[in-house]
Image (spheres, helix red, strand yellow):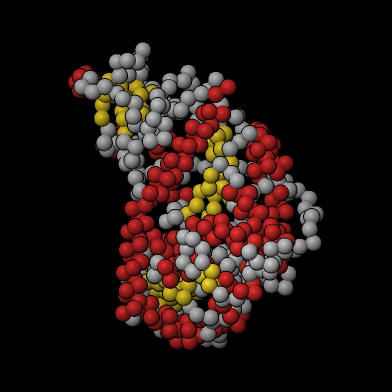
């Protein structure tokens, strides 16, 4: 699932903070270790920022899996922490079982080579496909740091893990048939040597396929501490074979450094996606229903390849990635296969089936939607219990009704609503009850769904036909003033004894999300 699908409300962009002096603390210059050391320097600024937020508004801190040092600050301030893992659940399964594997060996895992490893919940995979940092000896600093991050992340209140912007225009090959263009894009850190770029270009040229290719400047591999620095725009004439751009003009397009990947994948002309198999890219490919050619580069991407190609059968690997160099013949053959062959059509059918499953999961009432909603309500409940001593206890949260929030849609937007008059309340009011699943197209509207309640006398009579039982996910209450009311979130599936409360003043809940740079 993508968090951006659910977080549709406005997000505040916080002002930049001064960069602390970074003297390091280790002779290990691996970019991963340096990144963690740098983030640790920001704890003081993070603590100051968290203290500036009224405690009644801050219910939880959601951290990227690489921001585990922020838990020290949260623990000090008594703020619950959740860990967001922006990759697949398969990685979580492997990392959970790695300590037992390490304990059974006297050496690192690199010596195992391509020996298949079996982990509960994922298909067998060669040891060489594990994250490179985990292949070293267990006493190696980089390996120990990697495992400590995972262990600390698992020690938070819970884990959010994936299961299933306006731009200046989508670069594409105009006027081409549907599903006929190959899109090649390898993430924000996916770079190749000049030799590999030229070989890739030869394969593209020979294949005769239409394509859109994102080319980045080759990485500075001589100094790993500079790998995250801004890179120069690539000189395409120097990097690609002589005459390539002219020969492929009209059927191919090469863009520098970046393209709006989601929009390109969902363009009707896109027929295949050559990707590094980063988890987000894979999910975007599945949701777009585009067959994928796998070219893993780093991190858990080789593991993802095993899961998506061998287990789910919705991708094909471009052989040669284990050697660090793919031949033009292999690139040409796989492009022809996925676009032109019978096997390619079968692959497209399997991806289309997975696309439907992903769409269902993301819909209101789908597994991803419900899981994320349950997480937010868990945060809400936890925050209320922690604030009980401050006089703000209760499971429901109140939000002011804003007439006209839904424009002219009015009540028609509320499927499954039933009217009920609650005579047991000291203040007569009308309750609109929406079912736990469904009724809201996006999660954000669960928290702040509001409509003007203008009831006629006849509607009041209809409302008395049923008593309110307080058993809904969201309850909108109207008091004597037709322009006021509150929205309460307290689902019975989590809090069966909860009753909506009526606080003197509305309160809101806030989540703060911390994220590390993309990998």
Image-quadrant location for residue 346: bottom left
- In the image: residue 145, left or right of residue 347: right
Q: Tell me where residue 173 appears, x and y as whole percent.
A: 41, 72
Image-quadrant location for residue 82: top right
Q: Residue at x 46, y 28 (%)?
A: 395
Q: Residue at x 34, y 70 (%)?
A: 348
- In the image: residue 223, left or right of residue 430: right
Tally of marks: 0
Camera-side residue: 79 or 276?
79
Q: Residue 88, can we see it?
A: no
- In the image: residue 256, left or right of residue 225: left
Q: Tell me where residue 10 appears, x and y as whole percent.
A: 49, 41
Camera-side residue: 489 or 13?
489
- Please identify the residue farthest to the top as the structure is shown: 426
- In the image: residue 512, left or right of residue 170: right
Q: Tell me where residue 142 appears, x and y as whole percent.
A: 70, 62
Camera-side residue: 99 or 343?
99
Q: Tell me where residue 357 appears, x and y as whole percent.
A: 34, 57
């Amino acid at each position: 699932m993508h968090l951006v699908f659910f977080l549709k409300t406005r997000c505040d962009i916080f002002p930049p903070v001064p960069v602390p002096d970074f003297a390091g603390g280790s002779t290990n210059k691996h970019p991963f270790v340096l990144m963690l050391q740098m983030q640790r320097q920001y704890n003081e600024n993070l603590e100051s920022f968290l203290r500036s937020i009224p405690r009644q508004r801050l219910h939880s801190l959601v951290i990227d899996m690489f921001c585990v040092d922020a838990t020290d600050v949260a623990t000090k301030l008594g703020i619950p922490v959740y860990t967001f893992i922006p990759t697949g659940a398969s990685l979580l399964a492997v990392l959970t079982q790695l300590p037992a594997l390490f304990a059974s060996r006297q050496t690192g895992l690199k010596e195992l080579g391509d020996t298949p490893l079996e982990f509960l919940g994922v298909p067998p995979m060669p040891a060489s496909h594990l994250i490179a940092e985990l292949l070293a000896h267990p006493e190696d600093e980089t390996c120990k740091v990697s495992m400590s991050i995972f262990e600390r992340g698992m020690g938070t209140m819970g884990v959010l893990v994936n299961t299933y912007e306006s731009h200046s225009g989508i670069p594409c090959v105009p006027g081409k048939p549907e599903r006929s263009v190959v899109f090649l894009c390898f993430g924000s850190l996916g770079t190749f040597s000049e030799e590999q770029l030229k070989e890739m270009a030869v394969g593209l040229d020979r294949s005769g396929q239409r394509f859109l290719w994102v080319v980045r400047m080759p990485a500075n591999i001589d100094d790993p501490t500079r790998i995250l620095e801004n890179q120069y725009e690539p000189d395409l004439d120097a990097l690609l074979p002589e005459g390539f751009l002219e020969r492929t003009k009209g059927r191919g397009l090469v863009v520098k450094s970046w393209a709006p990947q989601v929009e390109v994948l969902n363009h009707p002309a896109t027929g295949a996606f050559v990707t590094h198999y980063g988890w987000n890219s894979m999910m975007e490919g599945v949701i777009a229903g585009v067959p994928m050619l796998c070219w893993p580069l780093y991190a858990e991407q080789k593991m993802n390849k095993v899961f998506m190609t061998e287990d789910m059968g919705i991708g094909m690997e471009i052989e040669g990635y284990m050697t660090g160099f793919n031949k033009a013949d292999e690139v040409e053959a796989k492009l022809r296969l996925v676009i032109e062959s019978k096997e390619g059509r079968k692959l497209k059918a399997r991806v289309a089936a997975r696309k439907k499953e992903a769409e269902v999961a993301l819909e209101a009432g789908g597994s991803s939607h419900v899981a994320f909603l349950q997480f937010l309500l868990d945060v809400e409940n936890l925050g209320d219990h922690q604030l009980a001593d401050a006089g703000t206890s209760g499971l429901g949260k109140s939000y002011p009704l804003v007439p006209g929030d839904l424009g002219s849609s009015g009540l028609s937007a509320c499927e499954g609503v039933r009217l009920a008059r609650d005579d047991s309340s000291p203040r007569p009011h009308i309750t609109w009850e929406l079912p736990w699943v469904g009724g809201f197209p996006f999660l954000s509207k669960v928290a702040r769904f509001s409509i003007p309640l203008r009831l006629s006398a006849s509607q009041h009579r209809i409302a008395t036909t049923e008593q309110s039982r307080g058993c809904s996910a969201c309850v909108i209450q109207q008091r004597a003033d037709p322009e006021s009311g509150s929205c309460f979130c307290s689902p019975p599936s989590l809090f069966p004894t909860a009753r909506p409360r009526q606080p003197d003043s509305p309160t809101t809940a806030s989540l703060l999300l911390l994220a590390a740079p993309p990998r």
